[in-house]
Image (cartoon, helix red, strand yellow):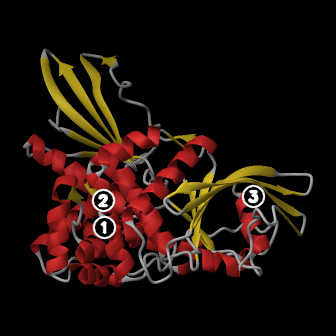
Amino acid sequence: MVWETESSVIVMLAKLVENGKKKCEKYWPDYNGTKSYPSMQVTCTQEEVFGCFTARSFTMTRWGATRQITQFHYTTWPDHGVPITTSGLHAFKRAVLGKQQEFGRNKPIVVHCSAGAGRTGTFIAFDSLTMEMNQKDNVNVYQTVLGMRRQRVEMVQTEKQYMLLHKLVAEEYALGTTEVGFGNLGLRIKELERMQGYAREMEKLNSVVLREKHTIQHFRIMDDRFAPASKYNASFIESYDRTKTEMIAADGPTEATIKGFWGAVLSNQVHTIVSLRSSSEESKHRCMPSLQIPTWNFDNFVVKLLTESDAGNDVKQRELHLSHGAGEQIEIGFYHFDNWLPNSIPSCGDVLELIKKTQKSKLHRSGKVLVYCSDGVGRTGVFFGVLNLIERAKLEGKIDVPWQVKDMREMRQGMVNTEVLYRFIYQCLVEFVSTFDVYSNSIGS
């Protein structure tokens, strides 16, 4: 079919296996491998992972003729469901259309999932509605889906997928394309400074309607073996690759929530904790062991201070041992950045160094990373935003602040809640770009 239609781009929206069930045959060879079929051969010449999707290049040979095919494989779209965050899907569509334009051939794009109806129909409708929006003053999701169903049954299968279409179109209209490459970040900053751009981007972000409360609740810490979940306000945050929720944003613990805090740490196997509260804030809520009080005992929890050292850049590093009764126990790397006062911004270099220390700790210890400040959305939102943006920048050479903040707000309401903090994300990225080689080398050392 791909050969006969002269297609150059394949879009795959399903995993090979989902929930233990086979959804699709692996019809391509491994990287640098070749698969032979009757009258044709397919060789995989390139494979690159870009967060939520993988791009593969194939050379297809038949009857002595050769063609180049690119497959875009979106790996985080659940069957009969929808992606929780959407910036990856927007970026995925841009990559697909960019490659189609690069090939310069007006041939069909082959799109498939498992049944070729739900996810496939949603993606095709999204593309169609985006083109319609660029040509007209309004779009009609209902008529688009109805027209597709007249050509193929059950296109856009579920109510959630139908709702997702409305959301994708609204986001495209409100935010548009805002990603910028390394080399153009300086120009972008000048535009934002000159045209009140930060405020305008914040206004656009605030205009995007958040998901329903129960969807955001999906990311809440709900394990209540140690305390009712409602007493500890924390949320899972997706990492750049969106395949794992290994990061947790949280309110800073207080005397009233300390049991819920350590319960969440233990039950979620958190091996790295970062505090963004200043020293004065931390002193008001003594929830960590110190050199003066090296062991904390409460409600069958025991938290012991093993070591404490000055890690530089206003960061104190502690090694902690956490246990609960005679059962679970873990060791934790605790990093306290004590120079970020409320309603202020610290040095960009200090924040980048803290992120670097956090990434090293995660590599060394495995387990999840929990970050907290006073409200778990302001300073914590900046930290996770910069971290995820750096991860993407290192791999793709691209930065997209508005979409990253939008995604985080869908997982935890109010993330990056002031223009000052929003601007600070850009400032940190400028600093990162200027020291990119040094930063990357030090992570692996």
The percent position of residue 303, horizontal first and vertical second, equals: 81, 60
Secondary structure of the residue carrying numbered label 2: helix
The percent position of residue 314, horizontal first and vertical second, equals: 52, 63
Q: CA distance from mark 3 to mark 2?
A: 35 Å
Instruction: Say left or right for 314 vs 391.
Output: right
Q: CA distance from mark 3 to mark 1?
A: 35 Å
Instruction: Say left or right for 362 vs 8.
Output: right
Per the rendering, the mark at residue 126 is none
Q: Residues within 10 Å of mark 3 (few under 14, many from 20)?
A: many
Residue drawn 13% across the image and 71% down it: 134
Q: Are marks 2 and 1 in contact (CB under 8 Å)?
A: yes
Residue drawn 61% across the image and 74% down it: 279
Of residues 368 and 152, the one nearer the viewer is 368
Per the rendering, the mark at residue 266 is 3
Q: Please, what is the three-letter code of the amino acid marked with disc 1?
A: Gln
Q: Quadrant of residue 423?
A: bottom left
Secondary structure of the residue carrying numbered label 3: helix
Residue at the disc numbered 2: 431
Of residues 246 and 139, the one nearer the viewer is 246
Residue at the disc numbered 1: 427
Residue drawn 57% across the image and 80% down it: 375
Instruction: Say left or right for 66 vs 254.
Output: left
Residue drawn 62% across the image and 71% down it: 234
Q: Quadrant of residue 159?
A: bottom left
Q: Quadrant of residue 153?
A: bottom left
Q: Which numbered mark, 3 or 2, is in the foreground of this view?
A: 2
Image position of 305 with respect to 33: above or below: below
* Residue 204 in view of the camera: yes
Instruction: Say left or right for 193 vs 427.
Output: left
Q: Please, what is the three-letter code of the amino acid marked with disc 3?
A: Leu
Q: How many marks?
A: 3
Q: CA distance from mark 2 to mark 1?
A: 6 Å
